[in-house]
Amino acid sequence: MIGVAVIGYGYWGPNLVRNLAEIPNTQLRTVCDLKTERLASVRSRYPGIAATDRFDEVLADPDISAVAIATPVSSHYRLAMSALMAGKHVFIEKPIASTSDEAQRLVDEAARRNLVLAVDHTFIHTGAVRKMREIVESSLGEVYYYDSVRVNLGLFQHDVSVIWDLAVHDLSIMDFVLPEKPVAVSATGMSHVPGEPENIAYLSLFFAGNLIAHIHVNWLAPVKVRRTLIGGSSKMIVYDDLEPSEKIKVYDKGITLGQRQGSSDNIYQALVGYRTGDMWAPQLEASEALRVELQEFADCIEKGAAPTADGEAGLRVVHILEAATQSLAQRGRVVELGNARRQVA
Amino acid sequence: MIGVAVIGYGYWGPNLVRNLAEIPNTQLRTVCDLKTERLASVRSRYPGIAATDRFDEVLADPDISAVAIATPVSSHYRLAMSALMAGKHVFIEKPIASTSDEAQRLVDEAARRNLVLAVDHTFIHTGAVRKMREIVESSLGEVYYYDSVRVNLGLFQHDVSVIWDLAVHDLSIMDFVLPEKPVAVSATGMSHVPGEPENIAYLSLFFAGNLIAHIHVNWLAPVKVRRTLIGGSSKMIVYDDLEPSEKIKVYDKGITLGQRQGSSDNIYQALVGYRTGDMWAPQLEASEALRVELQEFADCIEKGAAPTADGEAGLRVVHILEAATQSLAQRGRVVELGNARRQVA
Amino acid sequence: MIGVAVIGYGYWGPNLVRNLAEIPNTQLRTVCDLKTERLASVRSRYPGIAATDRFDEVLADPDISAVAIATPVSSHYRLAMSALMAGKHVFIEKPIASTSDEAQRLVDEAARRNLVLAVDHTFIHTGAVRKMREIVESSLGEVYYYDSVRVNLGLFQHDVSVIWDLAVHDLSIMDFVLPEKPVAVSATGMSHVPGEPENIAYLSLFFAGNLIAHIHVNWLAPVKVRRTLIGGSSKMIVYDDLEPSEKIKVYDKGITLGQRQGSSDNIYQALVGYRTGDMWAPQLEASEALRVELQEFADCIEKGAAPTADGEAGLRVVHILEAATQSLAQRGRVVELGNARRQVA
Amino acid sequence: MIGVAVIGYGYWGPNLVRNLAEIPNTQLRTVCDLKTERLASVRSRYPGIAATDRFDEVLADPDISAVAIATPVSSHYRLAMSALMAGKHVFIEKPIASTSDEAQRLVDEAARRNLVLAVDHTFIHTGAVRKMREIVESSLGEVYYYDSVRVNLGLFQHDVSVIWDLAVHDLSIMDFVLPEKPVAVSATGMSHVPGEPENIAYLSLFFAGNLIAHIHVNWLAPVKVRRTLIGGSSKMIVYDDLEPSEKIKVYDKGITLGQRQGSSDNIYQALVGYRTGDMWAPQLEASEALRVELQEFADCIEKGAAPTADGEAGLRVVHILEAATQSLAQRGRVVELGNARRQVA
């Protein structure tokens, strides 16, 4: 039985509490938050769980061996580092930290102490994204592009740009689904509220080969869109997270490359042919993603294994967010990710 | 009665012929093409119209005062310049020329000779795009962004990238609809056929203020998308050209900016509020766009007026295509449009 | 302060409890259910509310002046009649009773005792349905037809046919939205599970004039559909309850009737013209329907007023369900509603 | 080489002419129409084909062995019967005749003379409908229901109700796709133009087993819908003819029947379970349906074979149209199809 504390009982914390209360090999002991009314709410709904505003007490409690942190990102580093230094395993909301330097330090500390450090990249535990990864690995062929649109009206944040709020989802999904990691990023965007960070942004991600990824995020769109296209040499995927049931559609479509013909004045050249076949929407697992990943966190603690989204995954995502933010400030100047990583180390 | 010749009877030429044959103040006299079978096709369908492979005869014919050119883009400059120098008015397929230098020379020559030079930016004569411009002018408020996606499977071209084939539509629509002109462009993209130009591309366009435009074009998508979002301070538009009837939807949605409150640790800040109201899909005019613009071309010749899409519009579009192609080759390096234009002049 | 008890804490009861706990002029005092574990659940979540399996105690409690009944339909009559006879106001799940005879007796008893009898026709308190009624009244013109499709996979019930489970929603909406009441019904359908009631059914409803209504309900459909079309002489409505935001679309479309021309062999006659104009999707109120109607119930008790969905509305709906069930058994034989009603009285 | 004449050059005749002109084993010799301007149009587009207003000349021409009739339905019987009596094979627009009595006489005459009698049930030659039949035969299991909606705004006809105009498509598709034939029909509907036939109608079709079919047709709908659901014990189909590419979707969904449990007061009974699996949209053949069926007509003449949609198929459809029209006049009274057929014989 792993004793657990949840740190932060705001927007997301209650979901952590609800799931941790039901996982067989965890025992939720304490919820920690600074606000009195939130602690009261914990006490009334979960009479058997301690509620405190003293984080140091959590750290000092020998019966708590893991913490799940759901506080604003600016506090992630401080809380997670303290927890690791107190010998606790850590599950932490995305993004893992405010800078890649902080993220790297968390990764290093967890490694040094042999503790599990998991980051809450929720989407990668959904049936849709797991199926997508499976298809990319098994039948997509060479991956040509990854294109994602995540736009809606609201919720503007005043401390971070839309990249840190929305693109973080796409970057974590991409990190999980694609076989390669990006080497450079170019980002453009704009703020439409004076003095505030960008509310619309476009990221292009370059890889070693001829794969390209692109992410469009926007807090100021009239319609909600959650759609990813993945093009491969054998198959292509449309992932629409707003579809109630067929979230993943796999198209047996593509191009076929022929021998280049002698010169021709035909505007439609003979070199490229088109192939269209069936479309298939696989049945997806319906388990709650957060439950799956908290269960995995508990299992990793017991077995000493690494979670799917470990500190390194969290670091890679923060790394790109950081580089994209730099690029954004310079109207799309390419920022190499390799260099950036070395600076961090 | 304006005597007209159509140059080029391949993919698009037959549409020019069909429409010009029906416009009251034009008389279609000649169709010119290099291919014998195409000329035979003209003769059988339009017995009263001359069919020739001699462009010089068209130029020498005093009864022909205007030509409509629908040949591959590489021949645009030569054919259009010859026609202008022979004193003919010119209607020409988009893009107007292969380089902004050529386009500028055509504009200058037409101006010098006081001839009408029209470029076939077909979409701006559709009911949907005209309505969109009307709404942008009258009720959108400050324009925040213009975001367009134009993707499908095929048709790959081997002489120009997807930008020159697909983004040219978006750039000509944008040129017509937006009150401002872009000042710089950043483009990224990739080719997935060895030795061929880019088949997927992303363009970001910067303006003097905080307007941003973005265009996603792709020849290798599993689904066809033709969707433009325009965000403004008072209204937002979704233009979906694949909708059979409600192509334009106007959303009375947006943000309201309040006074910044004292410091708050709430992650959803109080500064930005959200406004959602009715959606409205205006009835659109259904006339064929090509007919409308060829009629306008004829009327401009009679009245000595300038067409909606004149040589300058064609030049502006080629200008951006050229700059985007430069940027594409450098992974999104920003190319200023102001500088480029000066170089041309 | 109106003392209230909720009878039945199964699928829907918890929603009644949650809402009644928040309404200012009600005081939720007791929840009554026969199952021990449900009562335990009430006690843990609502420590201040009594939980009992003794309905007679509820009836005897002088501090309880109203009951909300959410038990299986077969028990509605008995529970509601006892409550009315004990002088309690009654809010009851739809359908109000198993037969129109029972429904009539409840209506009569409530009238005799001057008690409020409200039936939970939830949908009529949604923003969408209220807006639809407003449009039908103000601008639809003469109502031509009402056509509704409500199909999905599951949930089969073994005591009543799909009509009593799904069509009851459409009938209650129709009763609220249309200015006229039907005079006859014809229903067809089929059972695909041996020994079980019909899982697919089609109802046609006739009115005094040339209005026709039709309802398609199905528990065995591969896709979920919730769509109603209302055609009028001036406007037409599409109500799609699965749309996240634009649930109601109003089309300015229709026919225009001209003078009949002399005989013509044209297959498309000149008599009928077509009119198409704008489409408009009004912003809808987002309040929870159940909260709205429970508040109305409380207000009606205080003011001695009749609720929107009173016992008569519940009776009219049961009346049609009953007649449709008769018709269904005879492959669509028309059953007059007028006669049926007289039999009840 | 089969000499062919096309009778009627109005709305559909030009499509027959265009296709017949391209089929290898037919020689289109004559087009017959009563209108001078239509004959002129034939002469200008097809100089090698005779154009005449004398149907008797067509019948007398020994080089013409087959006629394709595309005239208003009221003339079908007279023209087709004359052609058969003159020894010509006949291809005729749907519905094959105005009454089942006429249709029966055509069938009998063709049989007596050993001539091919084909009816233009166009949809059954589309890739979508052929695929649907294939799936129904191979993997749908027991067919539970067939439900079709075919609604739009216009085109009102003044001689026949919407059933003869729109439901005829569904009936011919159903006749081709389903393994059984209906035994009775119940139809309801309404006219909203004084003195004109019904513009909205609902047909329920009964079969010997527990299959039920239903067709909703409407000339006065704000949106266009062309959607058919077919439910089976193993699979379910959604056929949406307005989808540009995935017209047929096959759902691996359904119910599983368990043993009835002991009595339970649970409203969701244990008897019926739900099964949901993948969805699959097969690639469809894209050949023009009319071309396919005219080719089949020619091949049947050469081989003495029967076409897919022979006179019997045409008769069956008219039979149902006739019975539905009777039922419609009596608010859904069931009309047996067996009896009706015997009356015809």
Image (tube, coloured by chain):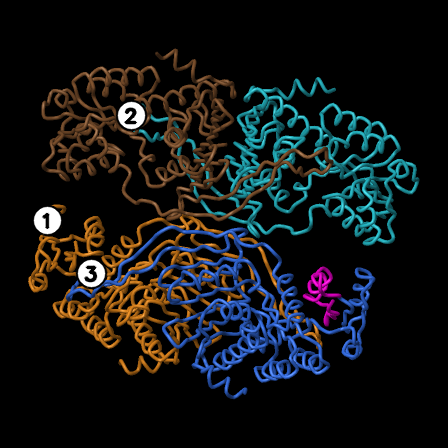
Chain colours: A blue, B orange, C cyan, D brown
Instruction: Please state the horizontal and vertical placement of residue C132, each as a whole percent of the image.
Output: 59, 42
User: Badge 3 local density, few (<14 within 10 Å), some, or many (20+)?
Assistant: many
In the foreground, C172 or B301: C172
Which residue in the structure is indicated by mark 3? B70
- Cα distance, mark 3 to mark 2? 48 Å
Residue A292: x and y, percent?
Answer: 62, 62
Q: Provide the chain ID for the residue under circle 1.
A: B
- For discs 2 and 1, the disc positioned in front in the rendered view: 2
The percent coordinates of residue A330 (x first, y second) are 46, 82
The residue at which mark 1 appears reads as B43
Name the amino acid, label 1: Arg
In terms of secondary structure, where does tag 3 sit? Answer: loop
- Disc on the earlier residue, 1 or 3: 1
Q: What amino acid is found at the position of numbered circle 3 in the picture?
A: Ala
- Residue in front for this viewpoint, D43 or B114: D43
Whether residue C124 is situated above or below residue D312 in the rendered picture: below
Q: Quadrant of the C terminus of chain C?
A: top right
| Residue type at the position of mark 2 | Asp
Q: Residues within 10 Å of mark 2 (few under 14, many from 20)?
A: many
Local SS, label 2: loop
- Residue at figure coordinates x 46%, y 73% from the top left: A203
Q: Give the range drawn in magenta.
A: A1-27
Rendered view: C65 above or below D93: below
Reading the image, the residue beneath label 2 is D310
In this picture, residue D308 sits left or right of residue D271: left
